[in-house]
Amino acid sequence: MNRRKKIISIISLTCAIMVFSMLIPASNGLEEVYAASTSGNTIDRSSPNVITDDDRADADAQLKAHMDSILKRTNPDEYTLKKLNDTFYSAVYYIANTEMSVSELWAYVGEMKAKLDAVVPDVSVTKPTTEFLQVGNNWETPSVSYGQQVSIVLPIINLGSEELTDLVVSPVVSNDVKEWPFEPDTTGYGQSFAEIPGNPFGGNYEAGMFARRELTFQFTVREDVMTGYYPLKFQVWYTKAGVRCEEPVELNVYVYTQGKPGAGHIGGDDGAVESKPRIIVTGFETNPKEVYAGDTFLVTIHVKNTSKDKAVNNVLFDMQAVESGTEANTTYAVFLPTSGSSSVYTDSIGPGNEFDINIEMTAKTDLTQKPYVITVKMKYDAGKDIDLTDEAKVSVPVLQEAKYDTSTIEAMPASISVGNQSNVMFSIYNTGKTTFYNLQVKYEGDSIEGGDTFLGTLKPGETGNVDSMLTAVAPTADDGTIIARVSFENESGQEVSFVREFTIDVYEETFDEPMMPEMPEENGQKGVSLPVIIGIAAAAAVIVLIVVITVIRKKKKKAAALKLEEELLDTKDED
């Protein structure tokens, strides 16, 4: 505890003489900062040799990469990490607020890299946490932002010759935002795994990396996290040769965090640099709500001055849509302002006040259905500080209207009796730029049933062929119209349907039966009339008479034939 108090005293003393920047250019993942111009600066800002904001961003990025390299190759203690942070942020502040030439900028970057190296006695030697457990060299310092959910992958290698078993790894969590950048989890973050093999080659690093174990921890960055490098400490318990370790091994890694404007820096004096107003985008909407390719729409972007005591003046907003597509090797903006200008100006936004940016745009007709980014670039003054800048992005989803067509529906046969089937065939064409999902056809009609057909996915430009069998279940009671209902889901998951009509005539098959004459009613009962009976009897008599005459004639002919035969026999006997 005495050593800790000494370290805190040294940190407090150092903070008294330290000047930090609250913001640095967003291009390197840190907050952007600018300060009042140095008095007496005689450099001509219009000269091409004077550094630009992009030059400053490149310089900051190089210094951050060098800082990451030092942390990866070393294991600095708390006091050394404090000195590294002091040196790093003083350099960033100087670059953000000093006018200089390009050559002077890179000379200064080289000088500050040397100063960072000098903070650590020997940056070329990795200091192992223990004699056998280390963090693998594939570890890369993550960069995270406030409120973000992140996955931290911790690679553990065993350089010892003996196998370790029953390992338990837990991060050292704290409620203090200056010590732990993530939301504390009440359930804990401990993880365990069965074993990590020993190193049979006597500490060979490549063999250790090959047999490493990687554990993934899920964290949520605190909303009040500070900007800077946080050390993450992990304790590892293990069993070696059947004996449980008395104390855990401690593995240290680092994470770079991006805090909210004004959140301060790790190890820094939060009051050393006066914070400057920031303009942030709080939301947006479009009118109409759904934007289709080729539509003209009004986009309203809500921005807010986050400062509680400073107004921002001479505010210029410039909306730049992402570029897409090629026409003769030329890219073009996906959204074009109808007025021809993409800029909006306002005199002032008061402390804590909001302002709405309204601009009418037209979406290109050939856009693919997906979200497209609009970058909002902001330039403004705040008190003595001029030409401060901020940047934000919003994504506008663009939809493509589903386009389709069908061929003529053919039903064969088009006229069927109840119980029989008709084969229905036609084609569905996807003539738009969106894919149809779960494409299917269902039929509606009182005289038919069945025929439901599922086609699945139909991509732009493709044809789906429908081949259905419909069964007749009742005679047609109307004009025989049958409805084919086609439905599918577009790329937004919305259901789209349309109908096509055709006709099938369904009839009931019948057979003719002889009709009996109806008898007149007698005493309330139906019967056969007397004339009908007489007619029937006469007809029967005629038939009987014809039969009798025919029989008589046949008998007469037979008798004549017998008589002739006898006469011929008698004549023969006489001869």
Image: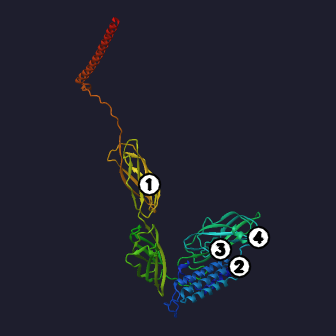
x%, y% of residue 62? 59, 81
Lower sequence index among marks 3 and 2: 2
Residue 313 in percent (x, y) is at 44, 84
Tag 2 residue: 125
Mark 4 or 1, which is nearer the eye? 1
Q: Is residue 80 left or right of residue 413?
A: right
Mark 3: give few (<14), some (14-19) or many (20+) Cα within 10 Å. many
Which residue does the image show at 62% across and 80% down from the upper left?
67
Q: Which amino acid lies under the numbered mark 2 shown in the image of this protein?
A: Val
Q: Amino acid at mark 1?
A: Asn
The answer to whether residue 294 is above or below residue 344 is: above
Quarter holding residue 256? bottom right
Residue carrying label 3:
253
Question: Disc 4 residue type?
Answer: Gly
Query: In which quadrant of the rendered image does the N terminus lie?
Result: bottom right
Whole-number angstrom distance, CA of label 3 to CA of label 2: 16 Å
Judge depth for marks 1 and 2 and give the one in front: 1
Q: Which residue is mark 1?
A: 465
- Real-space CA distance between mark 2 and mark 4, rounded to the nearest whole angstrom: 19 Å
To which residue does mark 4 refer? 202
Question: Which residue is at the far front?
Answer: 575
The answer to whether 561 is drawn above or below residue 261 in the figure is above
Measure the alpha-carbon separation of dots 3 and 4. Answer: 25 Å
The CA distance from mark 4 to mark 1 is 68 Å
